[in-house]
């Protein structure tokens, strides 16, 4: 079982690590130009697309869960039809973004206040990169399908290709053709399409035989489509809560002063780095849970969950030790600003505790996605957000200041894990037993 977990987790960890690497390369390219305006334009543009595309994260998760269950049942028709439905929804969503690009741009820059020069560059960046929407969202669907099919190597290959093409084109467009921030946008657009076409090529070569099971009439099955959309709706609400919490965290940091914003941003990056590692095991949880859930194998399902939590706890202990005792050199890798580093020491205890508080929520998310137990996952997130995060912050803020923000965030992460633990028997394990009966 450990080999199965690692075979699924390690490629996802490699894929995840490429995400911050690419952002750092883009930032470095802009940082070597003659104006800081280009850095600001890239930051604004990336923030806009992160918000737009993060909302479509439900498509990867929902596709992964349904596909893994079909794989466990050995139902290849269900598997190929899940992919078809996911790609259809992906391209419909992308078309909607392209059609609405003008009002989206106007609303975004009405909400965001920036200097005119930076805003003009960011607008240009936006109108180039928006045309990557079909590829970007389509990749969510395709990656989710591959994970559900117990194949995390192909998403890793696709992520590596996208990043290599992106870096190469960005260097060519920025320095070779002097396109600056527009060059970064065009490089990202072309890289996303290269990843999508490569992913489709891999599908055609290694899974093309599944197309014989495809029936166009299946896409018109309203009951199946409703179930698919219901699960994705719940996952979307769950994702929206995460967006709200972390957006509130950043905006509340900025409301104090720019110094606290810098400190909190740097420390939060350490949490995101940890999340890239633990997410690899969450993806493994999606694939294995869905497989054994679909096969109605309660014994292997429980065994995989236990092994996943052993790995998750081990990763959390290592990161907590590194962050708790070695926070200064770790933060130095992100900034050499002495005042930020010194101020971060006051809050380092929270980033040291965070991996231990958070690992269960990551793993349970993967388990719930594999079991398509989206209602319980949504409910646990709503409890953690509305009943815990905001009340804890507003109650403690008068007494603990910025510490209250970190305490609220840790309470939010811990509550999710605890709530999902108590919901798991009804949401996941009892369903397998009832199906077998």
Image (spheres, grey):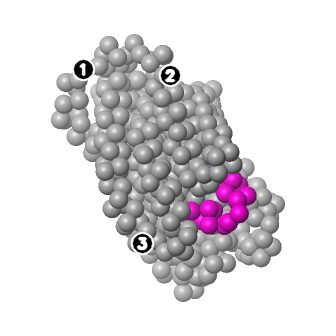
Q: 382 or 92, which lies in front?
A: 92
SS at circle 3: helix
Front position in the image: 294 or 235 = 235
Count neighbours of disc 3 (C-alpha within 10 A) and say few if under 14, some if 14 to 19, many if 20 or more: few
What secondary structure is the stretch in magenta mostly built from?
A: helix
Q: In front of the other: label 3 or label 2?
A: 3
**The N terminus lies in which quarter of the figure?**
top right
Horizontally, residue 120 falls left or right of residue 89, namely right
Q: On the picture, is 330 further left or further right than 400?
A: right
Name the image quarter holding the C terminus: top left
Residue drawn at x 56%, y 68% as measured from the top left = 118
Q: Name the disc covering residue 202, or none.
A: 2
For numbered disc 1, what is the local secondary structure? loop
Q: Residue at x 60, y 51 (%)?
A: 179
Whole-Å distance between the Cαs marked 2 and 1?
21 Å
Image position, residue 306 (x, y; %): 55, 38
| Location of residue 323 with respect to 94 vertically, above or below | below
Q: Residue at x 57, y 44 (%)?
A: 187
Q: Which residue is mark 3?
A: 111
Classify residue 81 by image quadrant.
top left
Magenta segment: 21-41
Disc on res. 215? 1
Q: Which of pointers 3 and 2 lies earlier in the amino acid sequence? A: 3
N-terminal-most mark, 2 or 1: 2
Would you say residue 418 is visible in this rendering? no
Residue 420 position in % (x across, y down): 44, 51
Mark 1–mark 3 distance (CA, rounded to whole Å): 45 Å
């Amino acid at each position: 079982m450990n080999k199965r977990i690692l075979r699924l987790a390690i490629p996802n960890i490699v894929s995840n690590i490429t995400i911050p690497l690419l952002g750092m390369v883009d930032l470095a390219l802009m940082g070597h130009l003659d104006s800081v305006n280009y850095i600001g334009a890239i930051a604004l543009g990336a923030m806009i697309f992160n918000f737009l595309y993060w909302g479509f994260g439900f498509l990867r998760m929902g596709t992964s869960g349904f596909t893994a269950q079909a794989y466990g049942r050995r139902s290849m028709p269900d598997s190929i039809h899940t992919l078809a439905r996911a790609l259809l929804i992906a391209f419909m969503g992308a078309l909607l973004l392209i059609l609405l690009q003008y009002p989206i741009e106007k609303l975004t820059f009405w909400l965001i206040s920036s200097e005119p020069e930076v805003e003009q560059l960011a607008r240009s960046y936006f109108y180039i990169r928006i045309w990557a929407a079909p590829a970007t969202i389509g990749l969510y669907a395709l990656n989710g399908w591959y994970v559900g099919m117990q194949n995390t190597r192909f998403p890793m290959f696709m992520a590596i290709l996208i990043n290599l093409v992106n870096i190469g084109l960005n260097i060519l467009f920025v320095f070779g053709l002097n396109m600056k921030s527009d060059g970064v946008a065009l490089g990202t657009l072309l890289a996303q399409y290269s990843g999508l076409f490569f992913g489709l090529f891999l599908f055609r070569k290694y899974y093309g035989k599944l197309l014989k099971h495809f029936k166009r009439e299946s896409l018109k099955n309203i009951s199946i489509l409703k179930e698919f959309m219901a699960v994705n709706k719940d996952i979307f609400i769950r994702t929206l809560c995460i967006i709200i919490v972390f957006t509130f965290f950043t905006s509340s940091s900025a409301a104090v002063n720019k110094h606290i914003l810098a400190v909190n941003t740097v420390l939060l990056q350490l949490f995101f780095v940890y999340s890239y590692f633990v997410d690899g095991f969450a993806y493994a949880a999606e694939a294995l849970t869905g497989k054994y859930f679909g096969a109605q194998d309660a014994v292997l399902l429980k065994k995989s969950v236990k092994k996943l939590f052993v790995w998750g706890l081990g990763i959390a202990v290592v990161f907590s030790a590194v962050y708790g005792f070695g926070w200064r050199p770790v933060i130095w890798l992100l900034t050499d600003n002495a005042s930020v580093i010194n101020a971060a020491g006051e809050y380092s205890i929270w980033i040291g505790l965070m991996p231990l508080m958070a690992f269960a929520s990551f793993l349970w998310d993967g388990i719930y996605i594999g079991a398509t137990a989206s209602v319980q996952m949504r409910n646990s997130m709503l409890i953690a957000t509305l009943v815990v995060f905001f009340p804890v912050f507003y109650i403690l803020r008068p007494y603990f200041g910025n510490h209250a923000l970190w305490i609220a965030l840790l309470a939010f992460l811990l509550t999710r894990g605890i709530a999902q633990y108590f919901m798991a028997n009804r949401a996941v394990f009892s369903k397998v037993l009832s199906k077998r009966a």
